[in-house]
Amino acid sequence: CIAALAPWGGLWRRRKMGGACCSKHQPSVGPRSPSPRKSVTFDGKSRDGSLASVSVPDASPDLHGKVSLSNHRSSDSPSSEPPRCISPVKFAARVSMPRAFVVDAGSRHTEVFAYDQGPDGMPVILHSAKLRRDDQSLMTLGDTINDGSDETFELFFKLLSDTLAAFDSNGGPEPAIFIGATGGVRKIRDSDAGARKVDQFARFCRCEHPNVTFRVVEGLDEVRWEWTAAKALFHAAFEDAGHEGGVQLLAGGGSSVQVGIRGMSTAEGGVSPVSMPLSVGEVQDAFKADAAAAAGEWPSLERSRQSLERVVDASWPHLRAHAPIRGGVLAMSGFADIAQLGFSERWISVEELKPLVDKTLDELLKQEGAGWDKAVEKWGGHRFWAEFPERLWSIGAAGLLRLSALLDTPGLFDPSASFYFSSEAPPLQPSSTRLEKGLEWLAPRLGGGVGE
């Protein structure tokens, strides 16, 4: 739950309800926040059960102030899992604290994360679940905002309430809720009409659910928070693999890609990490259209690749000073998802990865080979697979093409750079570099396979 890091500062601030609101009020979804905090602290659990604490400087403005046009300017997914219990914890001593929830509103799905207080007084993540309609399709905040009707806004909050009820809360104060919208809503906001729609949703939150905090998370904040969490959760594993320079980051959502390279700094005078509007939505739609033509050809392939390359080229001035990227790179979120088609949770060099990514993409388009077999294993049980399989495998194809465009960018990666695809910290056994899953945590062998 890396995207849920920084909102903790806002949840603890005292709310400032500015501006006039509509007269009718629905029951509050969350309580008013207590005292201000100077930093944001998150306690998460890696898969071995150990707590990892992250402290993030709160460089953001008050999350509870008025939301206006000036502040905002600048599909279905194949999962139907029940709420995940990430870290069920029994606490010996507990201090009174409102239950808190972070809503990660991405471009492909909206996921809710539940927190409680840990033994050290800091929040601990307990559960997570995606927001779903009655037909089990995923609810995205972007679609909700684009619709713009109060009825759809109320449906969003009804589904949110249903999801929170599924967490089987033990009662007590009503939860504090932070809704953080990322790349998909940023894209909507960056037009005149879209900015007005985002403002409309923000006003609805203030009027109908005054204890809910809504914020469009800027790309720079998103990459800062993700990178800070990645460093905290993965630094030991990277050191164990010989990457003592620290954790570098490549994170991909549906609408953006975040890059954190060693040597970048968010300090004054430093070079900030990079957020690129490198979306896979249009690429996926193009693949689905090609599949619907049933001609066995993919005319959109080269057009989509060129479109992705243009976005990377536009970000090159921000990346040039730190290229070529060397050492270890954590590829997470969307990149970790597509890696399940054949290269997840193992170290692999850029030299080995590039042909493997292109081969896997080709196998998806031809619907044969090891890559296609992995796609069937990953998505074959989904309700869309029998009738509309292209709605699912196109997710993988679009993600692979985006990764290929990045890997093929001249001078961006050194051939010896090493990737590890995962969104969860690996549980290393004590006194060993071997993972509990049986994979070896070893640096890649250039020109050869990775130990498995």
Image (tube, rainbow, N blue to C red):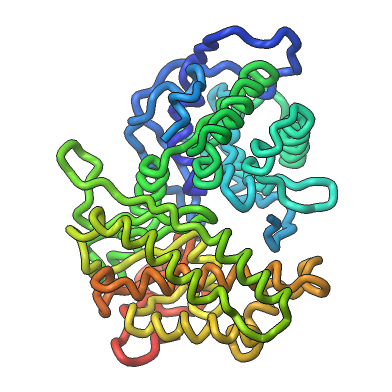
**56 or 210: nearer the eye?**
210
Quarter of the rendering containing residue 266: top left
Task: Report whether residue 61 is seen.
Answer: yes
Residue depicted at 70% across the width and 72% down the height:
390
> Of residues 27 and 205, which is closer to you in this image?
205
Count of numbered circles in the view = 0
Residue 413 quadrant: bottom left
Eyeballing the image, is 293 above or below 277? Answer: below
Please report the residue visible at 66 percent of the width from the left and 45 percent of the height from the top. 140
**In the image, is residue 64 above or below residue 163?**
above
Residue 92 in sight in this render: no
Residue 307 percent coordinates (x, y): 45, 65
Give residue 439's position: percent from left, percent from top. 46, 79
User: Residue at image x 58%, y 84%?
Assistant: 371
Answer with left or right where residue 382 lies relative to residue 416.
right
Image quarter where the C terminus lies is: bottom left
Name the one closer to the observer, 258 or 243.
Answer: 258
Q: Return the x and y of residue 152 as percentages of the image width and height.
A: 76, 34
Q: Residue at x 39, y 24 (%)?
A: 61
Identity of the residue furthest to the left in this view: 269
Instruction: Name the spot of residue 278 as percent of width and height, x first.
Output: 45, 57
- Left or right: residue 450 compared with residue 370: left
